[in-house]
Image: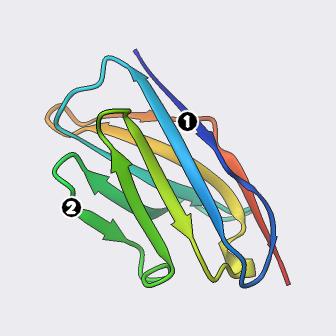
Amino acid sequence: QVQLVESGGGLVQAGGSLRLSCAASGSIFRINTMGWYRQAPGKQRELVATISSGGSTNYANSVKGRFTISRDNTEKTVFLQMNSLKPEDTGLYYCNLRHDLVYVDWWGQGTQVTVSS
């Protein structure tokens, strides 16, 4: 019922920047939280950043001050501006949409981010 399509991943050098985007479509409840999660090879998926439909944001400590999450509710798109990228930021980044009132999660296919030294 909900489709999420990520884009913007790529190969960058340490210290560089990338901007990820995720476009949502389908039956999207107004009260929701959208966010980004990432998973590196051999590691568990971890939360990167979230933003609620009300604009409240949450960031993993490892990305605070470097990443900025934002959203365009009209276009149903969430963005992740990533600056000062580090090799440890490398991973597959997934877009997530959570219908908070019913706690149902939807996931995108992921976009690869690779940061080289």
Residue depicted at 69% across the width and 78% down the height: 88
* Amino acid type of the residue that numbered disc 2 sits on in the rendered structure: Ser
Q: Is residue 21 left or right of residue 69?
A: right
Residue depicted at 37% across the width and 71% down the height: 59
- Asked if the residues shown at circle 1 and circle 2 are in contact, with their CB atoms under 8 angstroms apart, the answer is no
Quadrant that contains the N terminus = top left
Name the spot of residue 22 as percent of width and height, x first: 52, 41
Residue depicted at 37% across the width and 39% down the height: 97
The picture quadrant where one finds residue 11 is bottom right
Question: Circle 1 sits in a helix, a strand or a loop, which is it?
Answer: loop
Name the spot of residue 34 as percent of width and height, x first: 35, 46
Residue beneath disc 1: 108
Using the image as rendered, state which of residue 20 and residue 39 is in the foreground.
20
Q: Which mark is residue 56?
A: 2
On screen, 54 above or below 61? above
Name the spot of residue 116 as percent of width and height, x first: 85, 77
